Image (spheres, helix red, strand yellow):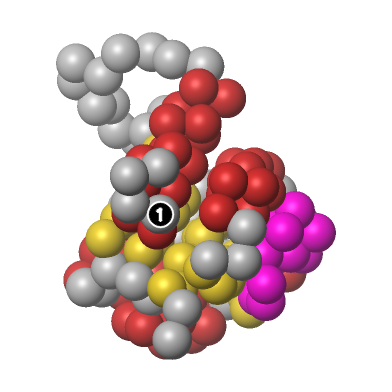
Amino acid sequence: MPMRIAVIDGMGGGIGAQLAGQLRQEIGDRAEIIALGTNASATDRMLRAGADRGASGENAIRVSAASADIILGPIGIVIPDAMMGEVSALIAQAVFSSKAEKFLVPIAQQHFTIVGLESKPISLLIAQTVQMVKERVIPNS
C-alpha cells in the first residue's frame, strides 16, 4: 500500500494547494496525496493543485488523520480556534494525536507567537517542507 500523505488546510486553501502541488511535482505517484479542507473551497483548491482525492469538514479530517502516514499543513491545524475559528478543538486534537509524522509550516497566527522563530518567506517554508517530506517518501533523494 502506498504511503498516505494528508494535506490539511482551511480558509482559502492557498498553503495546502502549494504544498500539494509542489509535493506532487517532487514525488510523482510514489504516495497518495489526500486533500483535507476545513471547508469545500480549501479542499477544491488542493485537489486542483494535484491531490489525488479529498474531503471536507471536521469528521473527514478526524477520520483521515488517523490513517495518514504523514500530515502537512500550517501550524494552525494543531491549534483550536486557529484560522479564524475553522480549526475546531476536535480537528486540532485529531491531528495532534495522529500517529502520522507531522510537518507543520509556521504561519503566523493572531492569538499566539512562536518565540525565536526566524521570519522566512512562505515560499521558502513550503519548499523546505516539501523537501523534508520528499526525503521521507524517497529516501536518499
Circle 1 Cα neighbour tier, 10 Å, few/some/many (<14 / 14–19 / ≥20): few
Left or right placement of residue 85 versus residue 100 in this view: right
Q: Residue placed at 45% from the left, 60% from the top?
A: 87
Label 1 residue SS: loop
Q: Is residue 54 above or below residue 81?
A: below
Label tally: 1
Q: Amino acid at mark 1?
A: Ile
x, y (%) of residue 46? 69, 58
* Residue 46, placed above or below residue 118: below
Instruction: Give the image quarter of residue 65.
Output: bottom left
Considering only vertical position in the picture, is 24 above or below 39? above
Residue 33 on the magenta segment: no
Give the residue at mark 1. 138
Q: Is residue 39 above or below residue 117?
A: below
Q: Identify the main secondary structure in magenta.
A: helix
Q: What are the residue bounds of the magenta stretch? A: 41-54
Q: Quadrant of the N terminus?
A: bottom left
Residue 106: where, in percent of width, then height? Answer: 37, 33
Q: What is the residue that sits farthest to the right in this orientation?
A: 48
Residue 134 position within the rendered picture, expressed as x and y whole percent measured from the top left:
43, 48
Q: Magenta stretch containing residue 50, yes or no?
A: yes
